[in-house]
Image (tube, coloured by chain):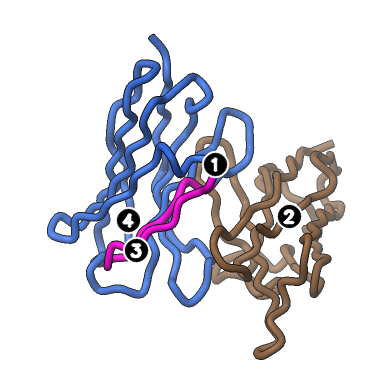
Amino acid sequence: DIVMTQSPDSLAVSLGERATINCKSSQSVLYSSNNKNYLAWYQQKPGQPPKVLIYWASTRESGVPDRFSGSGSGTDFTLTISNLQAEDVAIYYCQQYYSTLPYTFGQGTKLEIK
Amino acid sequence: QVQLQESGPGLVKPSQTLSLTCTVSGGSINSGGYYWSWIRQHPGKGLEWIGYIYYSGTTYYNPSLKSRVTISVDTSKNQFSVNLTSVTAADTAVYYCARFPDSSGLIDYWGQGTLVTVSS
């Protein structure tokens, strides 16, 4: 299985500032035939299921504010939240959907307001 | 709009079988194109795949649970189910049903989740 490792496990950021979450995969999730990274980011708020924010590493899901952005390729990826808002407090997960099943998740990063 | 809803007992005794059903509305399991999955989340922890099933009955199970898990589908009721045998306190978790397309593993719809507690 591909192992997904996120860093940090938690972070606290001031309102209006930028939050950066990293995700590293144990092997590349870049599919050479279509040049797509099979990497998604999810947001989970308390008492709710996760919700997809970003897929193909950098494509925002419809309705997701543009302060959320994804970058990276191969094995190293970043979720950036600019101009942090109070409603962004959540746990964020990366997920690879490249390999044969299962499509593993990272362990999660808890984002709080400083 | 596709909706998934988990149902089943919220309390299961140790050594017994945990059984949950996911009812799908707004879309047909039988139309194909999607895997129907179970994912759990231990209190305060991350997400763990239990397994998934295709409408044809093809299944995948997490190797760590494979000896205890069965996922089945009832296309006539537009439902799929999970049975987890010989449960212990370590199986206490929120159980989610979810869907992802067979062309990618991106989960597009989730149920709200149901907390199952294993306790005598």
Q: Chain of mark 3?
A: B
Which residue: 48% across, 77% down?
B103
Residue type, numbered disc 1: Ser
Q: Are marks 3 and 2 in contact (CB under 8 Å)?
A: no
> Which of the chains is brown?
A
Q: Quadrant of the C terminus of chain A?
A: top right
Extreme-left residue of the structure? B76
Taking the image as shown, residue A72 lies to the left or right of residue B2, namely right
Disc 2 crowd rating (10 Å Cα; few below 14, some 14-19, many 20+) is many
Mark 4, residue position? B3
Q: Position of residue A97 (x, y in %)?
A: 60, 67
Which residue: 66% across, 90% down?
A33
Give, as a single range, the part of the protein colored magenta: B49-64
Q: Is A112 in front, or is B34?
A: B34
Q: Chain of mark 2?
A: A
> Which of the chains is blue?
B
Taking the image as shown, residue A83 lies to the left or right of residue B94, namely right
For marks 2 and 4, give the CA distance: 29 Å
For marks 3 and 1, give the CA distance: 19 Å
Which residue: 27% across, 51% down?
B72
Mark 3, residue position? B58
For marks 3 and 4, give the CA distance: 22 Å
Q: Chain of mark 1?
A: B
Q: Chain of mark 4?
A: B
Q: Residue B64 has which mark?
A: 1
